[in-house]
């Protein structure tokens, strides 16, 4: 129901753009975002964006990653610049529904897309 794409192998300093589209079976989305999980680590928020355009993001990606949305298409993007080896992780798309702002009653997860930053 959440289909993510755009992961891959990139050299340090490079860029990638992730995309995630929600299927028509998901209704009342109020927030969409990206989380990541590195090997041996807990899943963490990368960035999230509400329907109204409010953004929450991790300090570690500010100034390098940009989240954007196409609300009409229920699609969220993550543009990642100046990538570092520590950005290597599986990136998961998330959609919160039946809520307001960053709060939601239910959520959906995509399967994840691997981003590897290595020379």
Image (cartoon, rainbow, N blue to C red):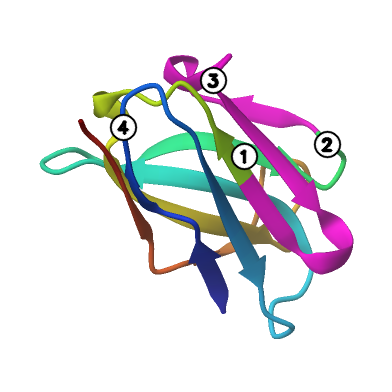
Q: Residues within 10 Å of mark 2 (few under 14, many from 20)?
A: some
Question: Of circles 3 and 2, which is in front?
Answer: 3
Bounds of the magenta span?
54-77
Q: Earlier in the sequence, mark 4 or mark 2?
A: 4
Label tally: 4
User: In the image, residue 110 lies at what x, y percent?
Assistant: 46, 67
Marks 4 and 1, how far apart in space? 25 Å
32 lies left or right of 70: left
Q: CA distance from mark 1 to mark 3?
A: 15 Å
Q: Which residue is mark 2?
A: 53
Query: Residue shown at 70%/30% (left/top)?
Result: 55
Mark 4 element type:
loop
Answer with mark 3 or mark 4, whichever residue precedes in sequence. Answer: 4
Label 3: few (<14), some or many (≥20) within 10 Å?
Answer: few
In this rendered view, identify the residue nearer to me: 1 or 114.
Answer: 114
Q: Earlier in the sequence, mark 3 or mark 2?
A: 2
| Callouts 4 and 2 close, C-beta under 8 Å | no
Question: For residue 17: magenta?
Answer: no
- Which residue is the site of mark 4? 11
Q: Is residue 77 above or below residue 3?
A: above
Q: Is residue 116 above or below residue 94?
A: above
Of label 2 and label 1, which has the lower sequence position?
Answer: 1
**Residue holding disc 1:** 48
Please provide percent x and percent y for residue 88.
27, 37
The residues tagged by marks 3 and 2 sit, at their Cα atoms, a distance apart of 18 Å
Viewer-side label of 4, 1: 4
Residue under circle 3? Answer: 64
Residue 49 in the image: above or below residue 90: above
- In terms of secondary structure, where does tag 3 sit? loop
Tag 2 secondary structure: loop
């Amino acid at each position: 129901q959440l289909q993510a794409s755009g992961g891959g192998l990139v050299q340090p300093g490079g860029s990638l753009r992730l995309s995630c589209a929600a299927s028509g079976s998901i209704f009342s989305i109020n927030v969409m975002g990206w989380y990541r999980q590195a090997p041996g680590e807990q899943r963490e928020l990368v960035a999230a964006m509400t329907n109204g355009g409010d953004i929450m993001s991790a300090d570690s990606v500010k100034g390098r990653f940009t989240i954007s949305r196409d609300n009409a298409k229920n699609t969220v993007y993550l543009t990642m610049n100046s990538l570092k080896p520590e950005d290597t992780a599986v990136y998961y798309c998330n959609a919160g529904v039946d809520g307001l702002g960053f709060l939601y009653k239910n959520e959906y997860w995509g399967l994840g897309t691997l981003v590897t930053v290595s020379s």
